Amino acid sequence: MAISALSATSLVLFIFNFCLQGTYGDYGGGWQGGHATFYGGGDASGTMGGACGYGNLYSQGYGTNTAALSTALFNNGLSCGSCYEMRCDSDPKWCLPGSITVTATNFCPPNLALSNDNGGWCNPPLQHFDMAEPAFLQIAQYRAGIVPISFRRVPCVKKGGIRFTINGHSYFNLALITNVGGAGDVHAVSIKGSKTGWQSMSRNWGQNWQSNSYLNGQSLSFQVTTSDGRTVTSNNVAPGNWQFGQTFEGGQF
């Protein structure tokens, strides 16, 4: 009996570890090396807006645990919404213990006039995070300026459902998709009106997705697919009397 119980326990642990590895494997595997700086001021007000289109990061739920990604990580905006655990690495003078998880909300553009090791921190092919200042200060001291880090993709944990903010006008529906859990980075979106079938949306910029169909007066459903291939369907998330500028909450990964 003891051997059987031990075997069963080992099997459970094996399955758990396999699933855990699979979870992280979907998001890019183990720890990698890079560097981090900070921007946006002590209240992170300078991080609002940005290349992902999220606008006010406070009201959208992202807070100050955010970062702008270098070209090597940004993937032309498809990495918006992805989450990374990071820790300051191998710099005992400036590093603080522990790790932090941040969401990608902006782009750190290259500065090709400066060398990669002297100001051109976000130049290709460098893996660099320009963090909101309050986030940076959780892993390193302010005076450090730039620190080496170890980082890895991790699942995003968000409160509530995926949010759909509908902007634009008739025949130009622009849906900003925020608060995405799981992989976090949206790679495909479809929309369906109560009088239409499912239609693929095209990515306009950041995480703004576009449909040129006339959908006024119809309840709207969305399908959101992230980089790991998982899809969440939110049926009739917006009622038939929706208006441009409104935000609606759907399902979650």
Image (cartoon, rainbow, N blue to C red):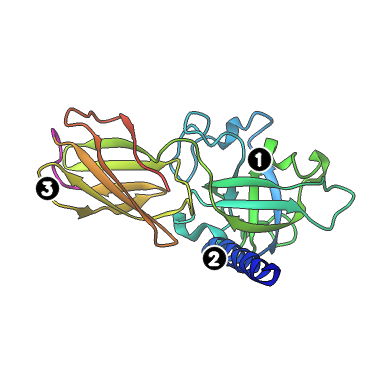
- Which residue is label 3 attached to? 196
Amino acid found under the numbered disc labelled 1: Tyr
Is label 2 or label 3 in front? 2
Q: Earlier in the sequence, mark 3 or mark 1?
A: 1
Quarter assignment of residue 180: top left
Amino acid found under the numbered disc labelled 2: Gly
Is label 2 or label 1 in front? 2
Is label 3 or label 1 in front? 3
Report x, y in % for residue 177.
38, 43
- Which residue is label 1 attached to? 39
**What residue occupies the far right of the structure in this picture?**
93
For residue 78, above or below residue 178: below
Q: Give the range drawn in magenta.
A: 212-217
Label 3, label 1: how far apart the Cα atoms are: 45 Å
Q: Nearer the viewer, residue 89 or 144?
A: 89
Q: What element carries label 2?
A: helix
Report x, y in % for residue 62.
53, 37
Label 2, label 3: how far apart the Cα atoms are: 37 Å
- Mostly what secondary structure, the magenta segment? loop
Quarter assignment of residue 138: top right
State the mark number for residue 243.
none
